[in-house]
């Protein structure tokens, strides 16, 4: 009897040691974004069914050999042997596995059912996923990460991927892009110096007469001046002359300092989220009621400088998207086509049979990062995820855009060439809310987890 008690006590001690060991601490923190994604998808799809092979369910153990990692986070061989950390949320047993009725894994075809976003779902979820960004617990986590002497960027990326509270967004974006240093003691001085550097560039390149410019520079400036009034035309704020002038200075200065690409149409769209986010530090209420004339010129100059540097940081990771012939975009469009073929072969086959090239509709998506495809009030939320991806963003865009396209998979199968062209040029996203956007990101994350570490799945 005493021996049994000792054995029981010994087992309890072993369990405690396992729970407190670094390895098990590592295990109990299984990739927060993946588990949060699955909970979100389960909530949205409650009452729906997947006619295809992907089944979302609860398992006590992950599938054999499946390592569920976060997109954009590379892992060492030692990390691959053990489950990744979960820094944000409570542990959960939600996992994804492949349902294999009467077929081997290699024979399965992935064809998930997409919610009919265009018609609107009558099965309204009991929560709004966009609200995660303002959840009290998340606010506390952001406050803790940002409050340290040195911000740990990996932790900040984990949090920001699922959305950043609006009032924290300016500081978080500066940090994620590497414009503001993680060390809080250096931050103010670095920002002051970088802003002064921008002012000097404006004085050197923009505030001069055309007599001091080359013919190419004059042509480029005129093109920018034409494009600025066309930027986000459905948002009245961007029709203010002073706003367009700020955009013009930022874009021209960037183009002069990046001669390998110069100015390319579409870059004007990429500056707009930065302008809105950094202006939000000084203007309150709805963007529809903003007037840049209410701001002190010094504050406008600081906002411009921040826009310039953050745009530069963003484009540094995708410069071949905007060089001659834009080879970076062409490469990603090809990857998008292959990914859609793997995920939803009937749609890919139908698009091909109708003679529609992916480049005809997806080029604008990559060129403007979906800014022209979704309501502008959702753009900053989408860009939280973009910026959290860091250097991995270009490749992850492929998964986001595949998820975006396949939102309308059933609809696309019914359209001929001309109808598809018109449909994809005017997608029915005007009434989208955070719910639809989060669904797109959730699917993108799951597909990235499934396919990114298995490139052979995407081979022809």
Image (cartoon, rainbow, N blue to C red):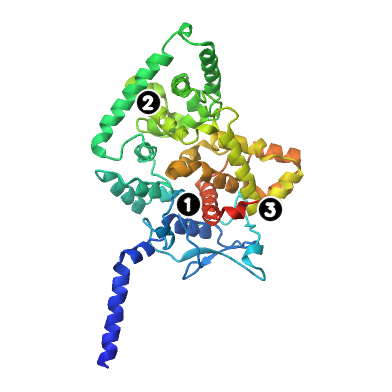
- Where residue 305 is drawn, which disc sits there? 2
Q: Residue furthest front?
A: 77
Q: Mark 1 Cα within 10 Å, few/some/many (few <14, many 20+)?
A: some
> Residue 394, percent across and down?
51, 41
Which callout, 1 or 3, points to the residue nearer the camera?
3
Q: Nearer the viewer, residue 413 or 444?
A: 444
**Secondary structure under badge 3?**
helix
Which callout, 2 or 1, points to the residue nearer the camera?
2
* Label total for image: 3
First in sequence: mark 1 or mark 3?
1
Which callout, 3 or 2, points to the residue nearer the camera?
3
**Residue at the spot 50% in from the left edge and 46% down from the top edge:** 434
**Residue at the spot 50% in from the left edge and 40% down from the top edge:** 378
**Secondary structure under badge 1?**
loop
Name the residue carrying label 3: 345
In the image, residue 45 above or below residue 356: below
Q: Nearer the viewer, residue 222 or 290?
A: 222
> Residue 376, percent across and down?
51, 36
Q: Mark 2 Cα within 10 Å, few/some/many (few <14, many 20+)?
A: many
In the image: residue 77, left or right of residue 103: left
Q: Nearer the viewer, residue 226 or 219?
A: 219
**Residue at the spot 34% in from the left edge and 52% down from the top edge:** 136
**Residue at the spot 29% in from the left edge and 26% down from the top edge:** 193
Quick check: marks 1 and 3 in contact, CB under 8 Å? no
Name the residue carrying label 1: 128
**Secondary structure under badge 2?**
helix
First in sequence: mark 2 or mark 1?
1
> Residue 179, percent across and down?
36, 34
């Amino acid at each position: 009897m005493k021996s049994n008690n000792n054995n029981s006590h010994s087992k309890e001690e072993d369990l405690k040691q396992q729970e407190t060991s670094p390895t098990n601490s590592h295990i109990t923190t299984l990739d927060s974004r993946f588990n949060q994604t699955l909970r979100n998808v389960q909530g949205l799809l409650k009452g729906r069914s997947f006619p295809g092979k992907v089944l979302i369910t609860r398992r006590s153990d992950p599938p054999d050999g499946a390592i569920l990692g976060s997109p954009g986070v590379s892992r060492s061989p030692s990390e691959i042997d053990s489950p990744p950390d979960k820094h944000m949320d409570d542990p959960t047993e939600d996992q994804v596995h492949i349902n294999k009725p009467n077929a081997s894994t290699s024979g399965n075809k992935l064809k998930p059912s997409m919610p009919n976003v265009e018609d609107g779902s009558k099965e309204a979820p009991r929560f709004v996923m966009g609200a995660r960004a303002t959840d009290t617990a998340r606010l506390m986590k952001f406050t803790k990460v940002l409050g340290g002497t040195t911000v740990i960027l990996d932790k900040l990326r984990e949090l920001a991927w699922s959305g950043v509270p609006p009032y924290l967004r300016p500081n978080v974006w500066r940090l994620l892009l590497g414009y503001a240093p993680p060390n809080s003691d250096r931050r103010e001085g670095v920002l002051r110096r970088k802003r002064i550097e921008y002012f000097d560039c404006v004085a050197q390149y923009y505030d001069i007469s055309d007599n001091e410019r080359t013919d190419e520079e004059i042509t480029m400036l005129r093109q920018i001046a034409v494009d600025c009034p066309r930027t986000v035309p459905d948002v009245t704020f961007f029709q203010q002359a002073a706003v367009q002038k700020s955009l013009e200075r930022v874009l021209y200065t960037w183009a002069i300092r990046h001669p390998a690409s110069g100015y390319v149409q579409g870059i004007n769209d990429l500056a707009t989220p930065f302008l809105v986010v950094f202006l939000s530090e000084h203007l309150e209420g709805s963007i529809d009621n903003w007037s840049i004339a209410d701001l002190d010129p010094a504050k406008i100059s600081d906002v411009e400088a921040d826009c310039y540097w953050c745009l530069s940081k963003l484009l540094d990771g995708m410069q071949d998207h905007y060089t001659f012939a834009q080879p970076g975009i062409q490469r990603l469009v090809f990857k998008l086509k292959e990914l859609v073929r793997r995920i939803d072969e009937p749609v890919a086959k139908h698009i091909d049979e109708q003679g529609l090239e992916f480049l005809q509709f997806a080029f604008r998506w990559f060129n403007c990062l979906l800014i022209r495809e979704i309501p502008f009030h959702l753009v900053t939320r989408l860009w939280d995820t973009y910026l959290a991806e860091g250097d991995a963003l270009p490749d992850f865009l492929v998964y986001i855009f595949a998820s975006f396209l396949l939102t309308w998979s059933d609809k696309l199968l019914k359209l001929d060439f001309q109808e598809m062209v018109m449909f994809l040029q005017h997608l029915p996203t005007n009434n989208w809310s955070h719910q639809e956007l989060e669904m797109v990101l959730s699917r993108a994350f799951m597909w990235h987890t499934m396919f990114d570490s298995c490139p052979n799945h995407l081979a022809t």
